[in-house]
Amino acid sequence: MSQFLKSHGLLRNPFIEEEAQNDKVFEDLVNEAGYTFNHQAWDKFFGDPPGRGTSMIFGVKGSGKSALRLALEKNIEHFNRGHRERILLLSYDDFNGFLEAFKRKREQDRNREGPVTLDDFRLAQHLDAILVCGMEALMAELKAADLPLESLERYQRHDLMMLMAFYVSGPPDRYNRIMSGLGRQLLPRGVFGGMGRGIKGVLTGLLTLGIAPISSQMFYRGVARSAEREILVRDRNARDVERALKSITRGYLKDQDVKRKGWRDDDDVRRLFMTKFIDCVRSLGYQQIVVVMDKVDEPSLINGDRDKMESFVWPLWNNRILQLHPNLSFKMLLPRQLYESVRKASSEKANVARFDKQKIIYPFRWGDKQLFDMMSDRLRICRADPSEPYPLDQLFDDSIQRREVLGALDKLRQPRFVLNYLYRLISETCAHADAHDDQPIRISHDIFYQVTATIGEDIRQYYQTLGESPE
């Protein structure tokens, strides 16, 4: 193998990794500024600037959805380095924590009738989970960059402090540390401000025999308990939330109407929270928020079940959210099975989702020339001099014409299959070829046809294992 690679000027095998998440070769490719896919869906998915506009991709496992996502994320990273108005990326793909907290809280509900199912996870819970992701993304940005918190208007500082108090995740010590620091930054009392508030509290307490301070304490406690009761996707002790909320004026919290019961499934409350979040983020210098939704088949409560995936995703297919704000966009990378839900949607559901406005990409397929270019790029980036092109057909004997290579790639259709195919071709070549000191070792005509003849059976077995059919 090493002789084959060396004979082509390759420092490593370009075709050894089939999973984009662990693919160092692909990572090096997308680290090149401006790298894009030669794919007809790229511009529709990518947007301009990167991430703008809601789009949905439906594809089978191994179709390259994860690679497309990684390329988008890297392009956003490159964009942020060169522009003052940045893009905030939210990864909505780790659902287990949200679903487990939701299930646990619903099971503790004394008024519950029947078992908890994914049908109970509604739009409000999706938006709560996305706001949790939003707070985490913003905290990471605060840590990595000097965000101008002082540029926020006072009402925005109250907005952000409330959202953080409700949605910052993690263990209690982390939460309390974050909220204490944010309180000092967003709503500093100052020496005289704190003293004035203290004196006012003492005087009021004396005049009212302590009734006002108790009333104020009960108000903050009531808001904290309400947030803990109505937000189901994360666990948080109400005492910690109460402590964080005390940085915010009582009058502001009264205006938000969040002390009441019954906003657990209230979409309008979450839309208001999302709008507040967008407003704060824009004032901090971001032009766009991009929510990337991926891996909906992976949570333990779903485990690849098509009906459960549909129950989970459907509430978020709501045009009032997907097109809530021009500076908020969703990029959904979804299993192919869910496209049937789109195709067979009732008129009522279709009117809510307005799929005609969401830039749907289906089928998500690769053409032979696109796969050829992708594999040629992988060869180039693995060579000692990655600046010069190295077309894929350089690996093959001269008797094998490019159209034959393209024909094989056309049958494979998916990057995962092509990577496995090329790895097998090279392995078989290394097992049979003699080394030549002065010439590149090439894939012979016999080995090419021998391995290519097995393509159909390999693909059939793969999809049979998944319980799917090839596109």
Image (cartoon, rainbow, N blue to C red):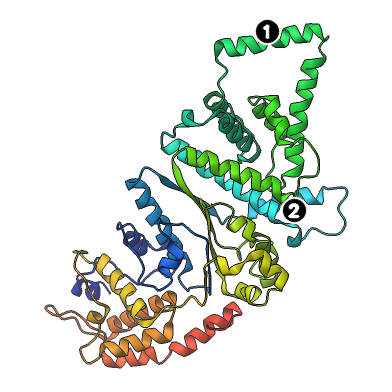
Residue 43 place in picture, x, y as percent:
41, 66
In the image, taking residue 240 as reference, residue 361 lies left or right, namely: left
Instruction: Label 2: state its secondary structure.
Output: helix
Q: Which residue is mark 1?
A: 199
In the image, taking residue 343 as reference, residue 52 lies left or right, namely: left
Vertical comparison of 335 with 222: above or below: below
Residue 395 can be seen, yes or no: yes
| Residue at image point 36% right, 92% down | 450
Vertical comparison of 250 with 165: above or below: above
* Callout count: 2
Vertical comparison of 191 with 369: above or below: above
- The quadrant in which residue 390 appears is bottom left
Q: Residues within 10 Å of mark 2 (few under 14, many from 20)?
A: many
Which numbered tag is attached to residue 18? none
Three-letter code for the amino acid on which mark 1 is drawn: Ile
Instruction: Label 1: state its secondary structure.
Output: helix
Q: CA distance from mark 1 to mark 2?
A: 46 Å
Single out the residue that lies furthest toward the left.
Answer: 438
Residue 246 place in picture, x, y as percent:
67, 25
Residue 158 place in picture, x, y as percent:
60, 31
Vertical comparison of 127 with 334: above or below: above
In the image, taking residue 224 as reference, residue 456 lies left or right, namely: left
| Residue at image point 29% right, 89% down | 403
Three-letter code for the amino acid on which mark 2 is drawn: Lys
Residue 322 place in picture, x, y as percent:
59, 58
Which numbered tag is attached to residue 103? 2
| Residue at image point 38% right, 75% down | 419
Q: Residues within 10 Å of mark 1 (few under 14, many from 20)?
A: few
| Residue at image point 57% right, 83% down | 469
